[in-house]
Amino acid sequence: MSLGSYLLRRLGGLLLVLLVTSFLVFGLLYLAPGSPLAFILGPRGGSPAQIAAAIAHYHLNDPFIVRYVTWLGDVLHGNFGFSIVYRQPVADLIASRAGTTTALVAYAAIIIAIVGILAGLIAALRGGWADQVISSLAAIGLSTPVFVIGVALISLFAVTLGWFPTFGVGTGGLDTLWHLTLPAIALSVASGAYLARITRTAVNEESGKEHVQTATVRGLSSGLIVRRHVLRNALIPIVTVLGLTIATLIAGAVVVENVFALDGIGSLLVKAILQRDFAVVQACVLVLVVAFVVINAIVDVLYTFIDPRISLGSKQ
């Protein structure tokens, strides 16, 4: 399959997933207990004029499918509705907070890739006590909840030692990087531990293959064998896990942003749910789904660059 055909196929799948997701997200308003007006106007309700305006604005007198198509058309034009809590367009709210979440996820992904792969390689190639220590630390990292790690990091490095700030995203540049260090570490611990275990397993499996033993007998250097024959073939499961990990980081950022008081999409989503700001909830969920599907599509394309034997669209 050519790259163009594959991208069109993935785009079609992406659009189908988004269509189904948008339908489910929009329908949650009407499946939830109570009247849709209770979500739109809040628990206190509103005056007769506000009720009439809400009914007209959200087309509540129209059939469900008509309302959904109208809402979907607005979304395709970049109109996600109006926040009843913040009193401003939802698109502006998300745009102002997307940078924080993107920077946090990117920072955490870099930490996961570097630490996870290096730790896995050391555990597999060194063995012995290094393998035992890394495996034990990975088990601890996997079993510790994100919010516990976040609170522990704040207590030690922010409150006790005073090395890092406890909340906020800073003023930009290196200051933002400094503010996001603890949140990124908290977000990356479990995923980095999992990637280390996957890397260790993949490298151990490839090291026992016949072509690696042949290269060793031929007298090739250990560094060359690891780079060309072990690590390259082990990259398929590593990249798969890394891609899925980055996608799940977007959801995990919800907890971290609340622990560290960051003004990202995750914290916005939590506040919107608690305040029943349904237009914001719909938009945030759609953004998270889009990011997840796009990242997985990118991972599928990367397979062919890592291993030319894998064709686009084939089953690994």
Image (cartoon, rainbow, N blue to C red):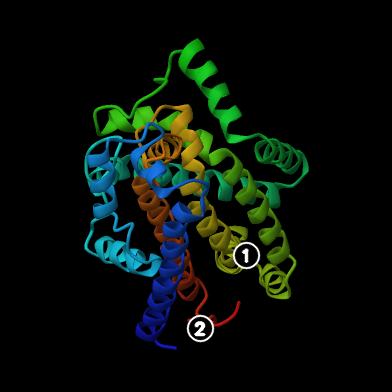
Q: Which mark is residue 230?
A: 1
Residue toward you, 48 or 22: 48
| Residue type at tag 2 | Ser
Q: Which is nearer the eye, 117 or 138?
A: 138
Q: Give the numbered dot on residue 311.
A: 2
Pinpoint residue 164: horizontal percent, then vertical percent. Answer: 41, 20
Going 37% across and 54% down the picture, which residue do you hit? 287
Who's the residue at 35% across and 44% down the image? 40
Quarter occupied by the N terminus: bottom left
Q: Earlier in the sequence, mark 1 or mark 2?
A: 1
Q: What is the spatial separation of the Cα atoms under label 1 and label 2, in whole angstroms?
A: 21 Å
Secondary structure found at label 2 = loop
Picture quadrant of residue 166 = top left
Q: What residue is drawn where x is 36% and y is 27%?
A: 179
Q: Residue 266: where, in percent of width, then height?
A: 42, 41
The 10 Å Cα crowd at callout 1, few under 14, some 14 to 19, many 20 or more, is many
